[in-house]
Image: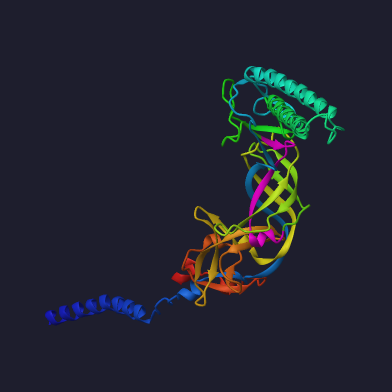
Amino acid sequence: MAAETRMRQLKSTSLLLLLPLAATLTLAGCKKPPPKITEAEQARAVRVVALDTRSITGALAASGDLVAREEAAVLPEVSGYRVSRVLVDVGDHVSKGQTLVQLDPALIQGQLLQQEALAAQAAVNAKQAEDQANRVKDLDNQGVLSQEAIDQRRFQARAAQATANAQAAALKDIRTRNAKLAVTAPVSGLILERTVRPGDMSAAGGATPWFRLARDSEIELAAQLSDSDLANIRPGQHAEVTLPGGVAVQGVVRLVSPQIDPQTKLGIVRVHLPVSRDIRAGGFGRAVFTDVSGAVLAAPETAVRYDADGASVMVVGADNRVHRATVQTGQRGGGYVQLLKGPPAGSRIVQNAAAFLLDGDMVRPQAAGVADTPSLAKPSAAAARR
């Protein structure tokens, strides 16, 4: 009897212990699994715009070299004479006709004196022969002198005059060469380069000029622009040019190139600059052309991202995934920037927050101007757990 009672107590205790476990298992079986969150639901909501052609009025930047508006070369015109003095140096401003180099006249002085004597002698001989010819002027066929003697005097007069003319021409040549011993500036301007030294020998028509001059000391910027940008530049347009030292000067477009380089596809715009010692030929300058307008393919400035790889935009594909597209920017204005290279017109690009997107991310496109709604926002981690 006691054993049966003991057995009943053990069974009752076991049931009491199993009831909480069963209840726990029942509750666990009734709890629903957490909902699955799809990639499309987690996608970031972004504003997108379609690339289109717009009229931009703003500024256009271009860079190029500082060059002389017009260069003049100075070389000697006579050969075989030694340089005795160089009177100017690089950086000097010279006037037209100013003597730059003086050649040694020692060799030509003796030739000049000798030729003057020969020319004088020839002139005297010509005068004497002319007087003898005049004496027989009216003696033709009169029997005083033979016709042969008369003709001989006339011939000698003409020959003597020809010799006198030749000697006079030789004298003029020597005097001209003597004057050319002073090498002068063909134009007024700034000396950019000098290659001559005292003691050098002159050689007419040499390959290397003794001096290079910037005519009237004018230096201008030769800015390089693409053919599409050239269409927006016109002569007389103002430009602000930044020099290598950071100084900015005002310039005016003087010339727009009539042709495009077939290799680089760039054209040259010549910007006239004021005469200043701070503007040096051979330097580098950057011009910003104002009041530039034209219809170009443009994107919002906020859509262009700049990093170590250059400028880019995030293009939204048909599957709502974004991919990075490299672009080349041009002129700016009104919050837009010209795309010289990049996606074609009609492409959808992310308008804002492109820096928070990675190549291949899925997004929820919204037309520009539509506000984000909470339902489109990315679920938080706490909500995902619930």
**Residue at x-position 60% and y-position 62%:** 340
Q: At which x and y percent is residue 102?
A: 66, 22
Foreground pick, 116 / 189: 116
**Residue at x-position 75% and y-position 34%:** 148
Tag count? 0
Foreground pick, 386 / 192: 192
Q: Residue 190: name its quadrant.
A: top right
Tell which residue pokes out farthest to the front in this image. Answer: 143
Q: Residue 134: name its quadrant.
A: top right
**Residue at x-position 58% and y-position 69%:** 349
Q: At which x and y percent is residue 343?
A: 56, 68
Q: Residue 99: name its quadrant.
A: top right
Residue 277 drawn in magenta: no
- Residue span colored magenta: 213-232
Q: Is residue 196 above or below residue 208?
A: above
Residue 84 lies left or right of residue 32; in this view the side is: right
Q: At which x and y percent is residue 16?
A: 27, 77
Foreground pick, 75 / 287: 75
- Picture colour scheme: rainbow
Residue 183 lies left or right of residue 135; in this view the side is: left
In the rendered image, the quadrant that contains the N terminus is bottom left
Q: Is residue 303 above or below residue 141?
A: below
Q: At which x and y percent is residue 113?
A: 69, 18
Q: Is residue 295 visible?
A: yes
Residue 229 drawn in magenta: yes
Q: Is residue 337 visible?
A: no
